[in-house]
């Protein structure tokens, strides 16, 4: 009985993980020469809820923020000795990985560089294929 219960719970948790509806933002922070900027402070903010997810870039300048709900996001990057960079207009769909790279300009911390752009439509980070289907399409299926 106990083994069957354990097996049943394992199947439920595995199924929940398979149907996770979260997305992620990943990218690289570099300086004007293309060199990595380690330990840059990155803050990903959900524009609709205000929920913030802070991370730091690794030694190679890469960062990843996972388990993000679908929605609109902005990403801010700060590092002493560089201008702050802000990227807005990032729209995440279900199970999407958006790549958002930053090229920080040398400058004072008080300066901010704002970039407004959409996340790329091509998903170069994974081999997953997916599509969001709206309610109207489902209702009009033959």
Image: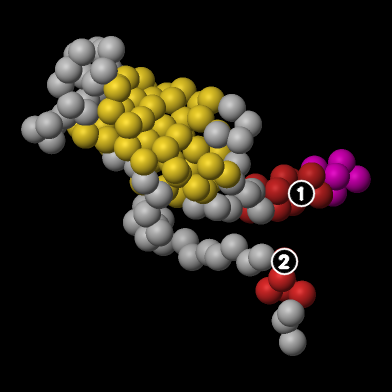
Determine whether label 2 and label 1 are within 8 Å by CB: no
Q: Could one spot residue 7 in this view of the protein?
A: no
Query: In this view of the protein, which residue sits in the foreground, 88 or 75?
Result: 88
Residue at the right extreme of this rendering:
1
Q: In this view, does 19 lie above or below 83?
A: below
In the image, which residues are magenta? 1-6
Q: How is the image coloured?
A: secondary structure
Q: Residue at x 51, y 30 (%)?
A: 45
Q: Could one spot residue 138 in this view of the protein?
A: yes
* Residue at mark 2: 135
SS under mark 1: helix
Q: In this view, does 42 lie above or below 48?
A: above
* Residue at mark 1: 12
SS under mark 2: helix
Residue 51 tag number: none
- Left or right, 63 with reference to 91: left
Counting residues from the start of the chain, the first of labels 2 and 1 encountered is 1
Categorize mark 2 by other alpha carbons within 10 Å: few (<14), some (14-19), many (20+).
few
- Give the quadrant of the C terminus: bottom right
Q: Which residue is drawn at 59% across and 46% down?
A: 70
- Left or right, 5 with reference to 93: right
- Left or right, 71 with reference to 84: right
Measured from the top left, where is residue 56 in percent x and y? Answer: 37, 23
Measured from the top left, where is residue 130 in percent x and y? Answer: 53, 64
- Give the quadrant of the N terminus: top right
Query: In this view of the protein, which residue sits in the foreground, 18 or 116?
Result: 116
Q: Which residue is drawn at 63% across and 31% down?
A: 49
- Left or right, 60 with reference to 2: left
| Residue 34 is covered by the magenta coloring | no
């Amino acid at each position: 009985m106990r083994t069957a219960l354990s097996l049943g719970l394992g199947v439920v948790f595995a199924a929940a993980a398979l149907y996770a509806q979260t997305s992620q933002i990943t990218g690289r922070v570099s300086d004007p020469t293309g060199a990595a900027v380690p330990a840059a402070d990155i803050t990903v903010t959900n524009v609709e809820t205000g929920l913030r997810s802070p991370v730091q870039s690794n030694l190679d300048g890469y960062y990843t923020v996972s388990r993000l709900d679908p929605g609109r996001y902005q990403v801010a990057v700060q590092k002493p000795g560089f201008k702050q960079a802000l990227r807005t207009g990032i729209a995440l769909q279900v199970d999407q990985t958006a790549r958002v790279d930053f090229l920080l300009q040398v400058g004072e911390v008080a300066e901010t560089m704002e970039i407004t752009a959409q996340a790329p439509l091509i998903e170069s980070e994974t081999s997953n294929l997916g599509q969001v289907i709206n309610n109207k399409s489902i209702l009009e299926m033959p």
